[in-house]
Image (cartoon, coloured by chain):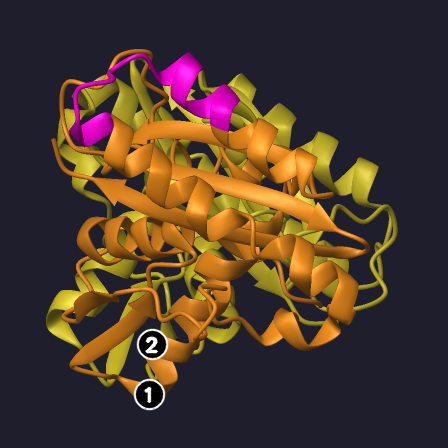
Chain colours: A yellow, B orange
Amino acid sequence: MGHETWVRVENLEKGLCGKSRHVFFRGVATVVTKLFNIVEPDVAVFGKKDYQQWRIIQTMVRDLDFGIKVIGSEIVREHDGLAMCSGNVKLSPENRQKALSISPALSRTKVEAEKGQVNCRELINCAIQTINEAGGRVDYAEIVEQESLEPVETIKTPVVFCVAAWFGKVRLVDNTEIDV
Amino acid sequence: MGHETWVRVENLEKGLCGKSRHVFFRGVATVVTKLFNIVEPDVAVFGKKDYQQWRIIQTMVRDLDFGIKVIGSEIVREHDGLAMCSGNVKLSPENRQKALSISPALSRTKVEAEKGQVNCRELINCAIQTINEAGGRVDYAEIVEQESLEPVETIKTPVVFCVAAWFGKVRLVDNTEIDV
């Protein structure tokens, strides 16, 4: 008899990366449960670059009463702004150059929102345009509530702007929290 | 944000009691995971009266790497053969009398199988008739493989004969392992 037990965080797993990767977060939650049961850690640190993954683990730990403190670690960037990721080594020099468009697009969105632009559609379109013009192909760009990851139309509470984009055959994700 | 994390044992949860109680075992697996994470036991004992529940917990513990030894405890019966269950107190004296038909129906099935009757349909029909004639209403009666809980037509390997039946508004489950 093979493995047949799955841990699912049913709302958080649906949006953002979950839309195109249907069973991905089921796998993440299940394998992290296995890891937690084997290692029995007191503290677990997850990078906020994979924001949805971090929120899923945090919710799973709360819902299943794991006695583990989950810490979200701030995104660490290369000197040129690219968020550190094991997948970066797969980028050709040309695609890496194109991918440098993500970080400033996120920063500008954050600045504009903090200056009072609350219309998400306008903020998002501007960022998509920046990345696409640099030669990327945006998979999704969404402004969502920080805990529920529900999309918002107008920024009223703390949100996070999440982007996934293709550069050649490499898909990168990045995000920035906007605490208005 | 409400609870949204569920543990599912996807094959074992489907048959037997799972057919009429669609989200029941999702709840069992999730709440037992919570209990395990809070109590952190070394050993957990589950009664084999709820055979499907026991197998689900056993599989969950294996698949999710809980460091817990799961023990199946043999069914304990009242002096008159009725399997002990918290629900028994809800039986009227009349329905309790009718419910006494289950245990001999299981025993006879086991004896017949051990004497060489391998045709499950005939064994099952005989047991259903006994319980229904006593005034019960059989919900299901199935002979299934002991680990996978997959129904079998002909007994070749160890099986378990599982029965659920209504007596008035009380639903009882019982079973007997047949190790041929």
Q: Is residue B43 left or right of residue B31?
A: left
Q: Are marks 1 and 2 on the same chain?
A: yes
Which one is nearer the viewer's eye here, A128 or B137? Answer: B137
Relative height, residue A127 to residue A159 (above, below): above
Task: Estimate how packed mark 1 is, as few (under 14), some (14 to 19) or many (20 or more) residues with alpha carbons within 10 Å.
Answer: few
Relative height, residue A134 to residue A68 (above, below): above
Q: Are marks 1 and 2 in contact (CB under 8 Å)?
A: yes
Q: Magenta stretch?
A: B113-126
Q: Position of residue A13 (x, y in %)?
A: 54, 43
* Label disc, if present, on residue B39 of the rendered structure: 1
Please give the chain letter of the residue carrying mark 2: B
In the rendered image, is residue A15 in sight? no
- State whether the magenta stretch is mostly helix, strand or loop: helix
Which one is nearer the viewer's eye here, B133 or A173? Answer: B133
Task: Estimate how packed mark 2 is, as few (under 14), some (14 to 19) or many (20 or more) residues with alpha carbons within 10 Å.
Answer: many
Q: Is residue B3 left or right of residue A50?
A: right
Residue B125 part of the magenta-drawn span: yes
Q: Position of residue A151 (x, y in %)?
A: 75, 46
According to the image, label 2 marks what residue?
A: B36
| Residue at screen point 35% across, 50% down | B56
Q: Quadrant of residue B45?
A: bottom left
Q: Quadrant of residue A92?
A: top left
Mark 2 secondary-structure assignment: helix
Mark 1 secondary-structure assignment: helix
Which one is nearer the viewer's eye here, B23 or B66? Answer: B23
| Residue at screen point 33% across, 76% down | B36
The kind of residue tagged 1 is: Val
Q: Is residue B130 left or right of residue A90?
A: right
In the rendered image, is residue A8 in sight? yes
Q: Quadrant of residue B96?
A: bottom right
| Residue at screen point 50% across, 68% down | B31
